[in-house]
Image (tube, grey):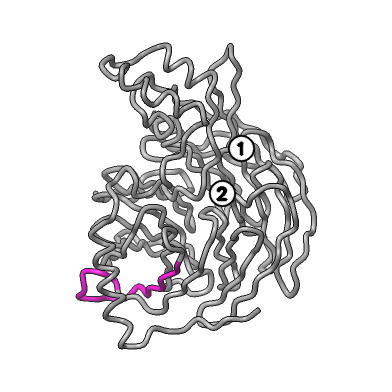
């Protein structure tokens, strides 16, 4: 099945711009700018919500904290949090008030800049870095010591900032409330919003089931199907095999015609998406996986574990493409608070997982902390923050 992405004609541009302006006015506040809509930890948490209000008068309640820490599960992350990103020889961390960039040679800070209502940070095709906040886009070119500033883009709850894998000056914003891709070019403009070009309406999709492929196409999952779409080009869809599970995440591989599919039952499956759809192989991920990431050589799994007698513990597993464990690492935990309803956000705010596409290093971090390890040796290279 093929489908043509239609560029916007001039008569359609004004209503679209008006709609985007209205959407921009509804953009979320900082706590929701990066992270996905906050998930419930388990069905039983609904029963606790009303009870939490009674405990909120106390700074902390040990009974509620113990229940959250020892009994309640954490659901998998629905999609990339985009709080940290590797570039070419760089590592960027987007906090609540500043963007910090370090060199990966010694992890010394090479740049700090204030931000307002941070949205996302990502690596572009040439290894440069792009960050978004409520005011602007900030581009740090490879080896540059200063940022280039561009007009902001509309960023809605659940939106993702995506690189074009072939052209470094092209970026895309994926809006998941009404699934659509907006194309932008990094170029000077007097407009308060960075102008956009083609818009692709995707139809129903799974938020985490989306990947920007190395050939410039985009792969996304909907109920029972995978679709592959090229900018200004064709769209092809494939029926997914029956797995008695839903797609949670799509991840890239070293090949341009393959992708990893992570299922809700813990299965990970390597899929051929061109020229024909085919399942290559599959295996089980470690249990209680919270976040996953991939590069050409590895799959990283950030997971938690706990029992009634012990607090929740976090660990990081580095797997090869056949599912063999190459490295296991302990990750510091953030204790569950005994008050408030946003305890999941507290526990997971520093649990963004990223793999470098250029060096054998892995990082876990977020708003208040940043941890980096060597995959080859398991050595800690950076432990910053809480």
Question: In the rendered view, would you say 366 is above or below 305?
Answer: below
Q: Residue at x 71, y 45 (%)?
A: 267
Tell me how many marks there are: 2
Magenta-colored stretch includes residue 182: yes
- Nearer to the camera, 267 or 104: 267
Magenta-colored stretch includes residue 193: yes
- What secondary structure do most residues of the magenta stretch adopt? loop
Q: Residue at x 25, y 73 (%)?
A: 18
Q: Quadrant of residue 256?
A: bottom right
State left or right for residue 327 relative to residue 336. right
The N terminus - image quarter: bottom right
> Is residue 128 in view from this perspective?
no
> Is residue 352 in view from this perspective?
yes
- What is the distance, in whole Å, between disc 2 and disc 1 at their CAs? 16 Å
What is the magenta range? Answer: 180-194
Q: Residue at x 39, y 22 (%)?
A: 337
> Element at badge 1?
strand
Q: Which mark is residue 289?
A: 1
Question: x, y (%) of residue 120?
Answer: 38, 53
The C terminus - image quarter: top left
Which residue is under mark 2?
355
Q: Which mark is residue 1?
A: none
Instruction: Assess disc 1: are there few (<14), some (14-19) or many (≥20) residues with their C-alpha within 10 Å of its C-alpha.
Output: many
Question: In the rendered view, would you say 228 is above or below 262?
Answer: below
């Amino acid at each position: 099945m093929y489908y043509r992405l239609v560029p916007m004609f001039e008569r359609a541009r004004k209503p679209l711009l008006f709609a985007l302006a209205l959407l921009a006015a509804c953009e979320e506040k900082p706590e929701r700018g990066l992270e996905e809509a906050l998930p419930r930890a388990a069905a039983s948490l609904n029963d606790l919500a009303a009870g939490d209000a009674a405990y909120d008068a106390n700074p902390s309640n040990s009974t509620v904290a113990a229940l959250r820490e020892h009994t309640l599960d954490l659901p998998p992350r629905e999609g990339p949090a985009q709080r940290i990103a590797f570039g070419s020889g760089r590592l960027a961390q987007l906090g609540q008030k500043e963007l910090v960039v370090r060199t990966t040679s010694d992890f010394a800070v090479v740049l700090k800049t204030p931000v307002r209502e941070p949205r996302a940070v990502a690596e572009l095709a040439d290894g440069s870095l792009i960050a978004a906040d409520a005011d602007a886009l900030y581009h740090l070119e490879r080896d540059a010591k200063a940022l280039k500033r561009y007009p902001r883009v509309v960023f809605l709850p659940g939106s993702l900032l995506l690189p074009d894998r072939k052209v470094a000056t092209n970026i895309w914003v994926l809006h998941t409330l009404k699934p659509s891709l907006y194309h932008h070019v990094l170029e000077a403009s007097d407009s308060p919003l960075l102008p956009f070009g083609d818009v692709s309406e995707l139809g129903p999709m799974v938020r985490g089931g989306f990947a920007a492929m190395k050939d410039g196409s985009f792969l996304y999952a909907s109920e029972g199907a995978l679709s592959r779409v090229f900018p200004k080009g064709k769209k092809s869809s494939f029926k997914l095999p029956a797995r008695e599970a839903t797609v949670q995440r799509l991840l890239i591989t070293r090949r341009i015609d393959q992708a990893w599919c992570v299922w809700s039952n813990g299965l990970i499956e390597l899929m051929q998406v061109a020229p024909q759809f085919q399942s290559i192989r599959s295996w089980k991920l470690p249990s209680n996986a919270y976040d996953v990431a991939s590069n050409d050589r590895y799959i990283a799994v950030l997971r938690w574990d706990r029992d009634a007698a012990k607090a929740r513990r976090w660990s990081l597993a580095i797997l090869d493409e056949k599912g063999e464990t190459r490295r296991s690492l302990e990750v510091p935990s953030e204790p569950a608070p005994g008050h408030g309803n946003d305890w999941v956000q507290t526990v997971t705010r520093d649990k963004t997982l990223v793999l470098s596409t250029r060096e054998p290093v892995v990082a876990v971090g977020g708003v208040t902390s940043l941890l980096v390890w060597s995959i080859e040796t398991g050595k800690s290279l950076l432990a910053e923050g809480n």
